[in-house]
Every structure is written in C-alpha cells, then in structure tokens.
Amino acid sequence: MRAAIYGAGAMGTVLGAYITKNGGSIDLISRNREHIAALRSVGAHIVGEAEFTVPVKAYLPEVMEGKYDVILLMTKQRHNAEILKFLSPYLAEDGVVCTTQNGLPEPLVGEIVGKERCCGCAVSWGATFLGKGSARLTTRTDALEFALGTIYGNCNRLEDVRNLLSLMGKVTVEENFVGARWSKLTINCAFSGISALTGLTFGQICDNKYARKVAQAVLKECFDMAKVCGIRPAKVQGHNVERILGYRGPFTKWLSYMIIPLAMKKHRDIISGMYCDLAAGRLCEIDFINGAALAYAKKKGADGPLNSIICNGVHEIERGERTISPKNLELFKNLV
C-alpha cells in the first residue's frame, strides 16, 4: 500500500513521524520548502509530550509521482477545492482521501474525488508547528485517539486507513460519524474559538473562571444546535461529552463547570491553530469551525449567538480591527 500525508504541518509531521517510527511507510508532503529540506536531511523531530527524531520520506508537491492508495488530507480547509483537484490524478482508482481536517469537510471531498473514495477522521489530539522539521505534541500520549468513518456508507480502503492510523494511537471506526464530527466540532468551537480570540491555551481557559464559563456556554449552545439538527453527538475517548459537559438545570450546570478542567486535563497545552494563524497575520479557519456549526444549524432554523460572537471577533482580528487578548472575553458579557 502506498500512502501520503498531504499537508505535513504540525499535525501531519507528528502523525507521519509516529507512523514511520512504528514501522509504517508514508510520504510527507508540504509546500514549505525549508520544512521539507529539514525533514529530508535531519528527520522529523518531535518534542513536547513525546521526544524523538525519526528519518522520514518528505517531498514537495511538484515532485509527486505515481498513484497513492491512501492520502491523508491534513491541510487547512480554505483551499480544499483547489487541493483536491490537484490530488485527484495521484489517487488510485480504488484509493481513498481521508480528511483529518476540523469542521465538516467530507461533503466537498466526496463531491470532488467521489463518495466511495472519501472518509473522514476526527482527531483527538493536538500539535504545534515549530518549523524546519520540528513539531510539538501538545496532548498526552495516553490520549492519542482517532474516530474514523464515512458519511456515505461505503468507503474504499477503510481498514487500510485504520491500520495506518493505529500506528500512532487508538482508532475507533464510528458508525455515527456525523455525531463524532459534531462532538469534535463542539469542543473546537468552544476551546479553539476562545483560544483564537484570547491567545489562551486550553488549560488557561479552564483556569480562568470567566473563560471557562464562556466555554461552557458555547458547548451548551453547540449541543442545543445538534439537537435541532437531529444529530446525536458521539462519545469522545469513551465519554459521553453531551451528558458530561452539557446541562439542563442549575445543578448539572454547576457540575459541568467543575468537570471541564478534568475533561481537558490531557489537552491543557493545546493552543488553537487558528490563534497561530492570526498571530502570524494569516486568515484562519474560523468559517470552517464555528462558522460551519452555525451554517449547518441555520439550515434547520437554529441560532448560535455565542458562536456568532466568536466568528465576528476573529474576523475583526483578521481585518486588524481587534487584537488577540483575554480582554476579548468582554464580548460575551451581555450573554454569559
């Protein structure tokens, strides 16, 4: 089987390093020339919750050749249509594109490459790009998990994808894959969205009493939108996140608030990739995370005022009208 990671940034570098270290064969592909040069000369250097360096196969897109049976799509979503059209000639007839991207990317992927050639993966860990062959794993190694599945029913090579990902962590083939996507999206809307606005890590959001209160309210809003949309959120790492983090009355609201730091304990060091993009002066994925949840819910007549605040605040940062700061929590003061 021939496999590739397209978009070997933070997450792709860590995943590719683990797969290679544990006996798998995979090509790491990125447009970042300095990064590819370092990967080819020194190897993938992983720090943080894991510390190792491993030789990897790394290439620029322009030197790709032949056909791949599995392509793990790990880029940001902003240019998916363009990227998928580029990748299509390199995908075997019975091959599959597995998107590990955040949000709800499968419909566009399936539309371009074919429904039977598309699957998705909700990733329950994080990483930060350090540049020139190096990435930091920001999730504890006992929490490296993947929820794999398809929204279309049948998918080529799903077992091959599962075997590949299992070289890094636990893989669950999720029958309720839309629910798995929504569970991950819910956590991203709350923690990644607030992280992008404030510059806080997930752990710092938990430690800041008001930031945690806002995150709790965003989680509840996403669970409410799921209910309107007829989506049943799937378990995350074996836990019913809606039951644990959602609430219906004063006691369960208090309990949810107290549990949030425990639920995020293994992910405290994660900082949103959207924050990293904003800090570097780039546009981020807010429209594909909080914006995607809003767009999906609005089709069913649901509203999400807290997610709207996050989207609008982040867009103001992108336009240079607002700075990244914990002071941005004041945006929620009339609602939370």
Image (cartoon, rainbow, N blue to C red):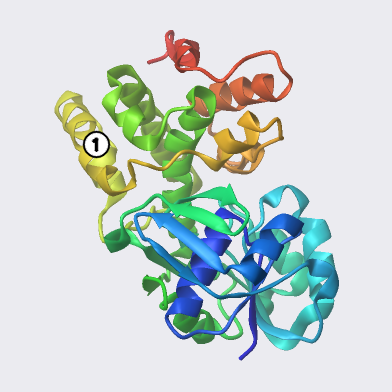
Please say if 31 is above or below 226.
Answer: below
Residue found 63% across the figure and 31% down from its top: 278
Number of on-image labels:
1
Give the image quarter of residue 173: bottom left
Give the image quarter of residue 18: bottom left
Give the image quarter of residue 220: top left
Residue found 76% across the figure and 72% down from its top: 113
Q: Quadrant of the C terminus?
A: top left
Asked whether the viewer can see residue 308, the reply is yes
Please say if 299 is above or below 70.
Answer: above
Image spot of residue 11 (x, y percent): 53, 58
Q: Is residue 236 left or right of residue 262?
A: right
Q: Is residue 201 left or right of residue 106?
A: left
Image spot of residue 136 (x, y percent): 46, 52
Please say if 186 is above or below 92.
Answer: above
Q: Quadrant of the N terminus?
A: bottom right
Residue found 76% across the figure and 58% down from its top: 33
Category of crowding for the residue at label 1, using alpha-carbon neighbours closer than 10 angstroms: few (below 14), some (14–19), many (at least 20): some
Please say if 49 is above or below 161.
Answer: above
**Outermost residue toward the front?**
41
> Which residue position is annotated with label 1?
261
Residue 189 or 326: which is nearer the viewer?
326
Residue 191 or 120: which is nearer the viewer?
191
